[in-house]
Every structure is written in structure tokens, then in C-alpha cells.
Image (tube, grey):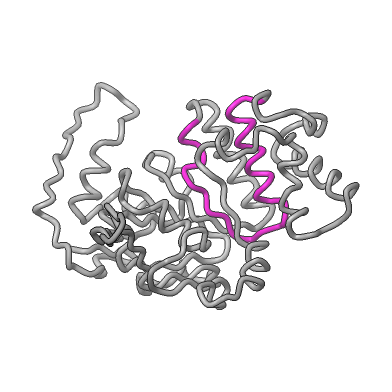
Amino acid sequence: MTPNEPLPGRTPVIEVRHLVKDYRRGRRWLHRGALFRAVDDVSFTIGEGETLGLVGESGSGKTTTGRCVLRLVEPSGGEVRFRGEDVLAASPRRLRELRRQMQIVFQDPLSSLNPRMRAGQIIAEPLVIHRLGDRRARRARARELLALVGLSPHLADRYPHEFSGGQRQRIGLARALALGPSFLVLDEPVSALDASVQAQIVNLLLDLQRRLKLTYLFIAHDLRLVRHVCDRVAVMYRGRIVELAPTLQLFAAAHHPYTQALLSAVPAADPDAPRRRLQFDPGLVDAGASLREVGDGHYAAV
């Protein structure tokens, strides 16, 4: 097994190879600005029905990586394959077709929902864009999806501001499921919600994954949540994956100093238990180190 293989026995759904995304900072007239590499040679594979967690602090490149996979942001280099097909080489027409199988759930449900549209219209919008069904069929599908995510179909005529944060995220999830995708990028899907509501949404995501046979790229910074949800975890630091392992192995024996520091900051269930918070020293990181195997299916850039 290599870092670019899914869990044993799983068919690859998403294959990312040497993904790069560059931005220009300080660009202005007659000045190109400084080059900033947000995603630097990132590679991973996600198998059928698997949840891969992508974690790291703000600015580590995890959200940009997720959006590059879907071509919501155009990568500067590398390769992304969905079920063997090169996503980055797809024509606009073919990409539109692929989007029926690859969707995203955004972090902030309020800002990602159109405040001028009713819940049913929001959920049915992908069907309108892809010209699927007539008006009656779309309305029926929207009500069906509301029920699927745990909301009453009678709420279809309400506006986003009339819902709670958790309900709005359920609407965003229903919209992502409208076209029947098999792969979802979950971009910090519960970070804007209260702890009690987070648990409800996470349980819903796990239930939908089992029922609909979904594959997830789960982007998060809450390691307690990642431990509960993900099969494997990839840790990002300054645009690079510095450690990748099955979840239990990572939490039991992290090798990279950045991962060790992240794990030491996770709050303990027992507040009185003795703990030692590790101070991360960037000087300990070899920026040019490649992932190497340090255990069974466990890779670290050390």
C-alpha cells in the first residue's frame, strides 16, 4: 500500500496527484505580484464509501484543495481523476455532467443559501440548472429531500432566515444531494453550529453515507470530530500533506511534529487529567521531506 492508494478492498473514486495551486499577492497595474503557493504537491486517493479527513489550521490549504478537486478553483498543476476520468481535462460540457456526481456542502449555511429563494427552490435549483424534470417533479423531489435530511416537507416554502443554523445546513445538504451524487466535499460542515447541533448533523452525514453509499472528503479543524467520522486522516501544513494514516493509528502514534502538536491541543474528556501541550517549532520541519512509510498504511514527511 502506498500513500496514493485507498483502503484495501475499496475501488478508487477520487485520485489526486501532485496537485498545485498558486496565487499572486499584491497584484496591481504593471506589477504581477509575489507568487504564493497555497497547495503544494498534494496527492491522495479516496476509495468507495470511504471518508478521508483533511485537517490543519486556517491557511493550511485544505479548503483550496477541496475546491480544486471539484474545479470550483482551477488548479495550477497536477491531476484529479474521478472514477478514472481526468477532471482537469474535461470540457465545460463534460464537467457539467461530472458535477452531477461531485458536489460540495459549504461551511456557512447562511451565506451559501440565497436569501431571496425559498427552501424548496434552493434545493431544486440544481435540477433546474441541469434541466431535469418539470416543475412539478422538481417540487416533489425537493420535498423528498427535505424529508431525507430530517426536515418536514411543509417547510419548503420558508426562506433561509426562518430556519435555525442546523436546519439551514440540512437544506444545504439536501441541495448537494439533489442530483444524486456519489462524492461530496464537506467543507467544515458543522464548524458554524452549536455543539449539540453538530452532533445531529454528523449523525445525519453518517446515516446518509450508509444509505446512499456516499464517499466523503471531510475538511475540518476539529480533531475530535475527525476521529469520530473519518476512516483515514491527511494532515496539511503550509499547503503540503505531512502525515496520512488510518484514523486510529494517527491518534495513537503521530510521527510528524506538527501532527503531534495538533493532537496535544485536543481538549480532554476529563479536565483534571494530566496533559502536556506541545509547542510546535517550525524549525523542526523539513519542508522538502516526502511522505515515507512509518507503519502499516501510515505515512509521514519525517
In the foreground, 43 or 158:
158
Q: Residue furthest front?
A: 30
| Image x and y of residue 160, in percent | 66, 30
Q: Residue at x 65, y 66 (%)?
A: 96
156 or 91: nearer the viewer: 91
Confirm whether residue 242 shows in the render: no
Was residue 267 drawn as part of the magenta stretch in this picture?
Answer: no
Q: Quadrant of residue 200?
A: top right
Q: Is residue 166 magenta?
A: yes
- Relative to 40, is 118 on the left or the right? right
Question: In the picture shown, does residue 232 fall above or below 144?
Answer: below
Q: Is residue 39 left or right of residue 124?
A: left
Is residue 110 visible to the viewer in this orientation of the structure? yes
Image x and y of residue 50, in percent: 52, 59
Residue 57 falls in which quadrant of the image? top left
Q: What is the number of callouts on the image?
A: 0
Q: Residue at x 69, y 33 (%)?
A: 116
Question: 163 and 203: which one is in front?
Answer: 163
In this rendering, would 279 be left or right of 76? left
Locate residue 55, reporting x and y percent.
Answer: 36, 49
In screen coordinates, is 152 left or right of 25? right
| Quarter of the image where the C terminus is located | bottom left
Q: Residue at x 81, y 59 (%)?
A: 132
**In percent of the image, x 77 and y 53: which residue is there?**
128
**What's the magenta region?**
163-192
The N terminus: image quadrant: bottom left
Percent across and percent down for residue 129 are 73, 56
Query: In the displayed structure, would residue 33 be above or below residue 44?
Result: above
**Which residue is at the far left?**
283
